[in-house]
Amino acid sequence: MNERDWDRVAGSWDEHIMSSLHENVNGSIAALIAATAASHRSILDYGCGVGGYLPLLSACFDQVVGVDYSARCVEQAQAQTRELPNVRVHTVKQFARPGSGGPFDAVLMANVLLHPRPPVRARILDLALARLRPGGVLLLLLPSIESVHLSEAVRRAHTRQRRSAYSRPAGSGAFDPGVIGINGQATKHYSAEEIPLLLQARRLSVISLARAEYSWRSESFDRLDHRIAARPWDWLVSATRR
Ligand SMILES: C[S@@+](CC[C@H](N)C(=O)[O-])C[C@H]1O[C@@H](n2cnc3c(N)ncnc32)[C@H](O)[C@@H]1O
């Protein structure tokens, strides 16, 4: 998806985008944010969308900046944080101007590194990391490829749904086993093994790699939570700059 696609989604966000923070049934995301805030005062929420994380970040950190390249998302994030004096929200263009903030003690990217093309993902990550102070912490939420495998197995074994939300992505880009169509949208998914490699290449060391779990309802599978112990999940990562 590009900037204009996200502008279009902004108007009906809740219909299209699951709130990872609010649907996280094992509470790992809020717990990691709170633990990070115990020793870090400022945070950049890069790819903040309509600002779902900003109220929690505002309560935990002294200084919070949200950034998104979708102007419509930024307008909504600004509207919902108007009463929060320690939060500012910028478009990527505004954020590129001198004096827009940083370096930050922490950078959060929650389901932002999704683009199917590696150079595009690398550029977004490097732009955000340029605002992380040395020794600062990067928090990432990344779609899990292992979770897709589990969901497909569960769909076949425990539901009557014949059609999957997942598909082979359209187009003939370079082979990447993690790129999977979600409702037709080519989306990068990550394996637990590849995440440290991605970060090591940028002199970042993984501090923690955990699951942010969701209800099976997030996969449109009803009445499975009490029958299956495992849940679908995103990878939740914290890493620090060496
Ligand atoms: C799945 S949404 C996640 C939004 C938010 N982090 C959350 O979890 O609620 C992905 C967001 O990343 C933003 N995004 C994607 N590419 C970006 C880029 N190159 N620069 C800034 N924002 C970007 C999109 O506009 C969108 O708001």
Image (cartoon, rainbow, N blue to C red):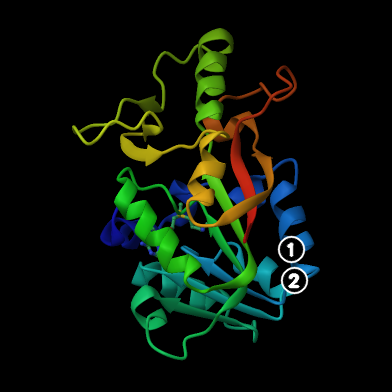
Residue reaching furthest to the left: 172
Circle 1 packing at 10 Å, graded few (<14), some (14-19), many (20+), is many
Quarter-wise, where is residue 136 in the image? bottom right
Q: Nearer the viewer, mark 1 or mark 2?
A: 1
Up/down of 221 relative to 59, above or below: above
**As rendered, which of 17 and 44 lies closer to the eye?**
44
Query: Reading the chain from its start, which is encountered first: label 1 or label 2?
Result: 1
At horizontal 44% and vertical 78% (from top left) the residue drawn is: 90
Q: Gap in Å between the C-alphas at discs 1 and 2?
A: 9 Å
Q: Quadrant of the C terminus?
A: bottom right
> Can residue 91 be seen in this snapshot?
yes
Q: In the rendered picture of this protein, how many numbered marks are placed on residues?
A: 2
**As rendered, which of 132 and 143 lies closer to the eye?**
132
At horizontal 38% and vertical 87% (from top left) the residue drawn is: 97
At horizontal 54% and vertical 81% (from top left) the residue drawn is: 102
Q: Amino acid at mark 2?
A: Cys
Question: What residue did someone put label 2 on?
Answer: 60
Q: Amino acid at mark 1?
A: Thr
Question: What residue did someone put label 1 on?
Answer: 36
**CB under 8 Å between callouts 1 and 2?**
yes
